[in-house]
């Protein structure tokens, strides 16, 4: 399509957008009495207007039923977590038995590493991204120490080549092959939080398996964003949070995926809790842990129903919108943003913007990371002043993420217009 940097073109795209009514299902934060241009759905997704009613339902059931709510609430709390499996399996691309909603992201990362990072004298290394999200770095480091290893030796970081910002797939695959039989685990983000690069999870998984290692992914920036097929890709495990693209509220309950080939293996070590125990006999409360032979077997505690209610409100919206429609619109929004930024650059004497997110649509999601070559802070301050909610990362990167549920083409056009006005 022929893209045009104009208000009329953006408005026309918004008019023909099949998902346009979804924007009205969210509260858009206000700046100076107007809707902000909210581009931080990669950090905290917006609140659906329906969330309050979903949470209120649980508060009401608690008020009127007390403990009986475990059985007689509208959505009984005893099995509350089960209402997510169908919808989430469509979002991350897996079987219903492979997914569970529980805990928080870093907690799940640790729990899954307990099962899937089992270093031996020979095979003990973890391959990850250099400058992985800090919580992940601390998890890798502390897991290595927990096993009596020196993180300096056990944790292998892959960096972009000099002068580049993103990782080349051949470098990832070569590093995996290089460490070969000393490699225990490959654990990358699905989408890098800083650059927005979406890695080739299937190829990475295949390479990890060829080396005799396990492949896991932190999907914090991928779940609800990019197209995932965790089951078919043979990914061993994954985890994600629900408050970024999944719009389930600050500190919301997280999710985990464990591939079918592992879920019913009772020999996998794990840190167990009663909610992972076989349902039929859980309340006999006997000694000896018998895990549920699905991803649910990794649960520890009973369901945090209030935060799960917020998660449910959001997943109902995802289902109504349909993942394919969301992916189609996501790609159009990202392409328009890349186009607008290139157009701004062209009208400068020399380039002022370097987009460090891959141009290839298959290698990116919603997020576009903009390296400002000059006037970075001025541009960011002006954006903030004019009602754009974006994110600044030192030294000079502005991250923006137009998301298909509530952003539109006009948001992107206005964003470009503000940058233009600063530069001229
Ligand atoms: C957002 C994010 C986290 C945050 O972890 P919590 O346990 O939810 O606080 C961790 N890892 C990555 C890659 C993230 O993007």
Image (cartoon, helix red, strand yellow):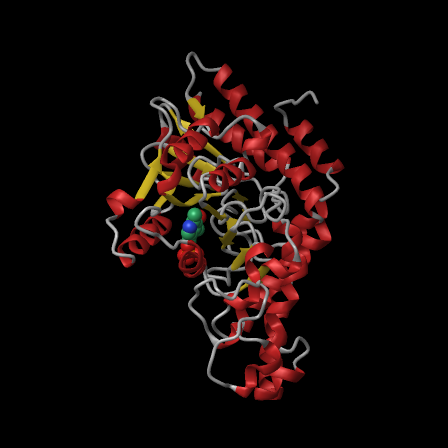
For the residue pair 413 and 341, the one nearer the viewer reads as: 341
| Tag count | 0
Image coordinates of residue 358 in percent, x first then y, are 50, 28
Quadrant location of the N terminus in the rendered image = top right
- Left or right: where 303 falls relative to 393: right
Work out whether residue 393 can be spotted: yes
Image coordinates of residue 326 in percent, x first then y, are 67, 43
Q: Is residue 250 above or below residue 151?
A: below
- Left or right: where 351 falls relative to 275: left
Work out whether residue 413 can be spotted: no
For the residue pair 373 and 31, the one nearer the viewer reads as: 373
| Residue ranking furthest to the top | 349
Q: Is residue 258 above or below residue 418?
A: below
Residue at left 34%, top 54%? Answer: 139
Image coordinates of residue 368 in percent, x first then y, are 50, 34
For the residue pair 169 and 103, the one nearer the viewer reads as: 169
Quadrant location of the C terminus in the rendered image = top left
Image coordinates of residue 171 in percent, x first then y, are 42, 28
For the residue pair 31 and 237, the one nearer the viewer reads as: 237
């Amino acid at each position: 399509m022929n893209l045009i940097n104009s208000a009329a073109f953006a408005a026309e795209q918004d008019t023909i957008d099949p998902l346009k009514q979804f924007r009205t299902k969210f509260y858009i934060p206000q700046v100076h009495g107007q809707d902000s241009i909210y581009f931080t759905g990669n950090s905290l997704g917006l609140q659906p207007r329906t969330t309050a009613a979903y949470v209120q339902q649980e508060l009401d059931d608690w008020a009127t039923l007390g403990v009986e709510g475990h059985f007689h609430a509208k959505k009984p709390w005893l099995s509350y977590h089960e209402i997510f499996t169908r919808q989430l399996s469509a979002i991350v691309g897996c079987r219903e038995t492979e997914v569970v909603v529980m805990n928080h992201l870093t907690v799940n990362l640790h729990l899954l590493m307990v099962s899937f990072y089992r270093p031996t004298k020979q095979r003990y290394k973890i391959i990850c991204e250099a400058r992985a999200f800090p919580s992940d770095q601390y998890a890798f480091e502390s897991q290595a120490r927990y096993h009596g290893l020196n993180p300096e030796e056990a944790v292998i970081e892959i960096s972009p080549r000099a002068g580049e910002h993103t990782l080349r797939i051949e470098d990832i695959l070569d590093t995996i092959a290089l460490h070969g039989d000393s490699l225990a685990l490959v654990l990358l983000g699905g989408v890098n939080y800083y650059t927005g690069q979406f890695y080739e999870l299937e190829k990475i998984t295949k390479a990890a398996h060829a080396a005799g290692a396990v492949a896991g992914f932190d999907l914090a920036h991928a779940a609800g964003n990019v197209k995932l097929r965790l089951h078919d890709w043979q990914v061993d495990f994954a985890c994600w949070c629900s408050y970024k693209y999944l719009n389930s509220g600050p500190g919301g309950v997280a999710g985990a995926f464990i591939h079918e080939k592992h879920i019913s293996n009772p020999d996998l070590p794990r840190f167990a809790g009663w909610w992972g125990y076989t349902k039929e006999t859980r309340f006999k409360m006997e000694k000896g842990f018998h895990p549920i032979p699905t991803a649910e077997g990794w649960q520890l505690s009973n369901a945090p129903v209030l935060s799960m209610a917020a998660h449910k409100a959001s997943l109902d919206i995802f289902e109504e919108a349909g993942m394919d429609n969301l992916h189609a619109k996501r790609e159009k929004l990202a392409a328009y943003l890349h186009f607008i930024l290139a157009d701004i650059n062209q009208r400068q004497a020399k380039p002022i913007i370097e987009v460090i997110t891959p141009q290839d649509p298959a290698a990116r999601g919603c997020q576009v990371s903009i390296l400002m070559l000059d006037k970075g802070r001025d541009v960011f301050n002006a954006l903030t002043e004019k009602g754009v909610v974006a994110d600044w990362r030192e030294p000079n990167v502005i991250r923006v993420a137009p998301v298909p549920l509530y952003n539109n083409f006009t948001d992107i056009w206005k964003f470009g217009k503000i940058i233009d006005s600063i530069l001229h």
